[in-house]
Image (cartoon, rainbow, N blue to C red):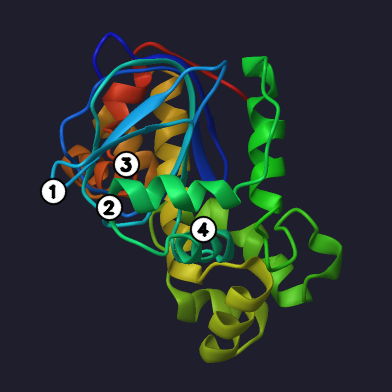
């Protein structure tokens, strides 16, 4: 991020969200599906790998797709969603053509969401995601299988301990590994391994927000070192942990 990025950040188990002033970026690629919504009558200018540019108020950029922001935007909402989640798959399916024009066309299928106050970032983000949710939201745990509830309770402590193995989780919740993997994907809307990766990134981001350096944050989240954390974070969001620590406020 350059100094032109200044805004608010929200990070949940399913999405990384940024709301605020957006700066120019170089051509980059990350593994998240990205939703870019200009707010307050402003516009975004997105460029694809071929150099074709489109100006618009909304874009859906598929995972693993090179893109860049050509001009600053004073007010925009950027959402980064894991493509292996149900909502990520739904968003990917909206993009019928490659390139910046296809991204802008795909965004016509997005629901409208009001967002005037950065303090509403969490609520607005969740409303937008729920509009594309195929499976029951993670928060609705009352309908979850008891073993999945147990797994969700175990995972945060396992992530912080640094060792998360599907076979160990399956043993502790009294289920076969294959059954756990299938049921987790079915009920949570995301495979177990990507879910764990998101938890690790969330823990690391929280540590950075609280003032930890990257090495401390990496170890707290179960990454090998700060380089490992930075690489995974950048591959997922197109930003490094140190970049989001500058010029941003966090929304709980």
The N terminus lies in which quarter of the figure?
A: top left
Q: Secondary structure at mark 3?
A: helix
- Which class describes the residues within 10 Å of circle 3: few (<14), some (14-19), or many (20+)? some
Residue at 40% over, 37% down? 204
Q: Which mark is residue 219?
A: 3
Q: Residue 198: image x %, image y %?
A: 45, 51
Q: Which residue is mark 4?
A: 91
Q: Which residue is mark 2?
A: 99
Does the residue at mark 1 contact the one at mark 2 (Cβ under 8 Å)? yes
Mark found first going from the N terminus, 3 or 2: 2
Mark found first going from the N terminus, 4 or 1: 1
- Which class describes the residues within 10 Å of circle 1: few (<14), some (14-19), or many (20+)? few
Does the residue at mark 3 contact the one at mark 2 (Cβ under 8 Å)? no
Q: Residue 75: image x %, image y %?
A: 48, 16
Mark found first going from the N terminus, 2 or 4: 4
4 vs 1, front mark: 1
The C terminus lies in which quarter of the figure?
A: top right
**Image side of residue 196 versus residue 115, left or right:** left
- Label 2 to label 4: alpha-carbon separation: 15 Å
**Image side of residue 101 versus residue 80, left or right:** left
Mark found first going from the N terminus, 3 or 1: 1
- Label 4 to label 3: alpha-carbon separation: 33 Å
Q: Secondary structure at mark 4?
A: helix
- Label 4 to label 1: alpha-carbon separation: 22 Å
4 vs 3, front mark: 4
Q: Residue 54: image x %, image y %?
A: 31, 36
Mark found first going from the N terminus, 1 or 2: 1
Q: Which mark is residue 20?
A: none
2 vs 4, front mark: 2
Q: Which residue is mark 1?
A: 50
- Label 1 to label 2: alpha-carbon separation: 8 Å
């Amino acid at each position: 991020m350059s100094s032109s990025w200044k805004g608010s950040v929200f990070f949940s188990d399913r999405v990384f969200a940024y709301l605020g002033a957006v700066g120019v970026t170089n051509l980059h690629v990350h593994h998240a599906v990205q939703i870019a919504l200009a707010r307050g009558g402003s516009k975004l200018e997105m460029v694809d790998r071929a150099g074709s540019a489109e100006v618009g108020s909304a874009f859906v950029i598929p995972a693993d797709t090179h893109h860049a922001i050509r001009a600053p935007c004073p007010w925009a909402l950027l959402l980064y969603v894991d493509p292996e989640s149900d909502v990520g798959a739904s968003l990917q399916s909206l993009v019928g053509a490659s390139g910046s024009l296809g991204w802008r066309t795909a965004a016509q299928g997005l629901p409208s969401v009001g967002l005037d106050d950065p303090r509403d970032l969490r609520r607005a983000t969740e409303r937008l995601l729920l509009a594309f949710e195929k499976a029951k939201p993670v928060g609705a745990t009352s309908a979850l299988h008891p073993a999945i509830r147990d797994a969700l309770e175990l995972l945060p402590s396992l992530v912080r301990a640094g060792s998360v193995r599907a076979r160990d989780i399956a043993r502790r919740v009294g289920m076969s590994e294959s059954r756990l993997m299938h049921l987790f994907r079915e009920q949570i809307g995301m495979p177990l391994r990507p879910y764990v990766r998101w938890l690790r990134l969330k823990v690391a981001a929280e540590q950075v927000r609280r003032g930890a350096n990257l090495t401390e944050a990496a170890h707290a989240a179960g990454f090998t070192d700060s380089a490992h954390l930075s690489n995974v974070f950048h591959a997922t969001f197109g930003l490094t942990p140190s970049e989001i620590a500058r010029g941003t406020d966090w929304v709980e």
